[in-house]
Structures are given as structure tokens and as C-alpha cells.
Image (cartoon, grey):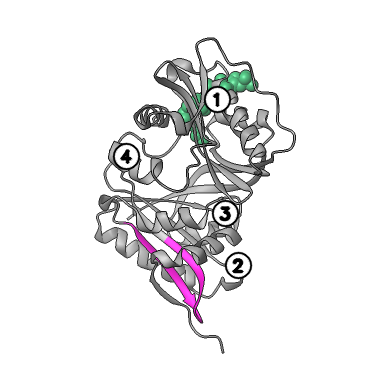
Amino acid sequence: MRTRAVVRQAVADDAEAVAAVRRVVAPYKVMSPAATRHMLTVQSPGERFLPLVAERDGEVVAWASAGLNVWTSDPGQAHLSIFVHPEQRKQGIGSELAERLHQHLTEVGAIRVRTFVQPEGLEFARNLGYDGTRQMHFSGVELTSLPEPPETPEGIELVAFDTVDAHAAYTADAIASLDEPSDSPLDSVDYDRWLEEIWNGPAMDKSLSVAAMAGDEMASFTVVETHSDRMWSGMTGTIPGYRGRGLAKLVKSVALRRAATAGITAAYTSNDDENGPMLAVNNWLGYRRVQTEMGLLRTL
Ligand SMILES: CC(C)(COP(=O)(O)OP(=O)(O)OC[C@H]1O[C@@H](n2cnc3c(N)ncnc32)[C@H](O)[C@@H]1OP(=O)(O)O)[C@@H](O)C(=O)NCCC(=O)NCCS
């Protein structure tokens, strides 16, 4: 008889195993073990982040987490995610993880919880009271035949992130993020938290991330995160006064070319179905859809 899976809080040393489960369940969500360790260990205290794993015979078979969204001024907004290894499903592991996380979120004052599910997880989530119609498209491109980058407009200089001032990058990120489609506005990004979680985190590859500078101001940027020969686009943004001039196409196509030169073979990204401009940029770059997840909400 199989032993029962045991749920416990995840610790830093689970990073490799958690990254492995994530890779099996959602290979398009590129995240290195170092970035996974950072996610497990570095959070804002206000997030009340709870990371869990389910272990069977000493092996991690599922990963789940939940916490409060500290990047929004909307109070009580929470996130929850559950990844159960495909061979370990239909045994109550997901339900136990969900129960633990919902209990935790209730204790820390969450009002509304957001989750993303793959099509096969939809029924599970609906049975837990989640509902909604938001769609998040994940897409990928092989870095072999990229389009020619558009011309760099007059007054714009392309630079790598390792030469830019952190505060200029923070300002562009915070301003552009305000317009990213979501259920809660990304309108409360604290600079020190941003430095710790994003700028100084191990995920961002500053030598491959590209900014379009207009003097000291960052007009447009794209963040590259890598794991072995694959990359993830952390964020692409253009501040409102510079939109519609091809800058996102420029920074992202240059970044993908530089990544290809550095030995990266495939790039992945995610876009909300309502994000017409970013979908247009990615279609032009040759990205093809690999998965659509449903974004669902539940009140507690
Ligand atoms: C998405 C974003 C980065 C685009 O920046 P940009 O510099 O204006 O982009 P570009 O000028 O290079 O290209 C924009 C493309 O979108 C198209 N576009 C603009 N508005 C559109 C809309 N409502 N629907 C569909 N396509 C649209 C443009 O026509 C252009 O494509 P084309 O050159 O093939 O015609 C910018 O709008 C932004 O910062 N948004 C908020 C942050 C965000 O959502 N980032 C992406 C997170 S995944």
C-alpha cells in the first residue's frame, strides 16, 4: 500500500524539489532553483506568505503557496497556487493543500483570493468556490528566426540593465505596471521591497535585460530571467508618453537576440487576454501559445 502524503511548510532546501515539480506541471513557467529559493525565503512580512509541500516517501510530490498581495492598495487581496505532480493526482493532496491555505488566508485577513488554473484544474477550482472568466495566455518562441529589430528612434539609447540606475528602472516598472490588466491595480509598489524581491533577486539577468533610455528617463524596458538554456520575460513596459512608437518591439527583440547569442534557445512569457498591445508585440516576435490558464476568484 502507498504511504500517505504529508503536508508541511516548505523551507529553503526544498527549492530544487519545488522547482522540479513546477517544471513537470508547468514547464512554460521558467524559474531557476535559485529563483525558487528566493521565492521561498524572501517576502514582505505583510504578505504573510505560506509555502507548503506535500511529501511522500521523502519525495516532494506537490507544491502550493498563498499570501496577501502587497503590491496593491486594495485591501485583503490574496493569491493562491497549487501544483500537484500529474502522477499523484486524485488522492486528496490538492484538497488538503487548498484547505490549509484557505484557513491561513482567513486567519491573516484575506477577503478575496485569486488563482490561475490549467484547463484540467478548472473543475477542482470551481468545486472550491472559484469563478471567473479571465484568461492568461502562455506562449513560447524558439530563438532561431527572430524579426529584425525596428530602428532605434532619435533620442533613445539602448542599454543593458547592469548599467542603469535602479531607481530609473523602478520608476518605469511602477508606472507601466499600473496599466497591466488585472483584478487589483498594481499601484502600491514599495521601492525597498521592489529592490529586495526583484532588482536584487537572482531571477533577473541584468546583462540580458534591456532598457530604452530617453536621457535619464527609462522609456521602455524588458526584463529577462534565465534558467539554463531557457528564458522568461519578467516584465516588459513602456511608460505612457512613449507608447505606440515601437519601443517595446525594439527592447524585446534586441533582448531576445542577445539572449540567443548568450546560448538561450527558447523564450516564454504570459499575457492577459485583454492585453492587446503586448499580445501584438509578442505575435510579431513569433511567440506561439502553449497554454491558456483561467484566472479565477473566490471570496472568503
Ligand atoms: C504593452 C506595452 C509594453 C507596449 O509598449 P509599446 O512601446 O507601446 O509597444 P510597441 O509600440 O512596440 O507596439 C505596440 C503594438 O501594439 C499594438 N496595439 C496598440 N494598442 C492595441 C490594442 N488596443 N489592441 C491591439 N493591439 C494594439 C500597436 O499597433 C503595436 O503593434 P504594431 O506595431 O504591429 O501595429 C505597453 O502598452 C505597456 O507598458 N503596457 C502596460 C504594462 C504591460 O501590460 N506590460 C506587459 C505585461 S505582460
Q: Position of residue 1 (x, y in %)?
A: 56, 90
Residue indicated by mark 1 = 248
Q: Secondary structure at mark 3?
A: loop
C-alpha span from label 3 to label 2: 12 Å
Q: Is residue 146 magenta?
A: no
Residue indicated by mark 3 = 118
Q: Residue furthest top?
A: 154
Residue 86 - label? 2
Q: State if disc 2 and disc 3 touch (CB < 8 Å).
A: no
C-alpha span from label 4 to label 1: 25 Å
Residue 72 - label? 4
Mark 3 vs ligand 1: CB under 8 Å?
no
Residue 220 visible to an observer of this rendering: yes
Position of residue 59 relative to residue 39, above or below, is below
The magenta span reads: 49-64
Q: Give amino acid for label 4.
A: Thr
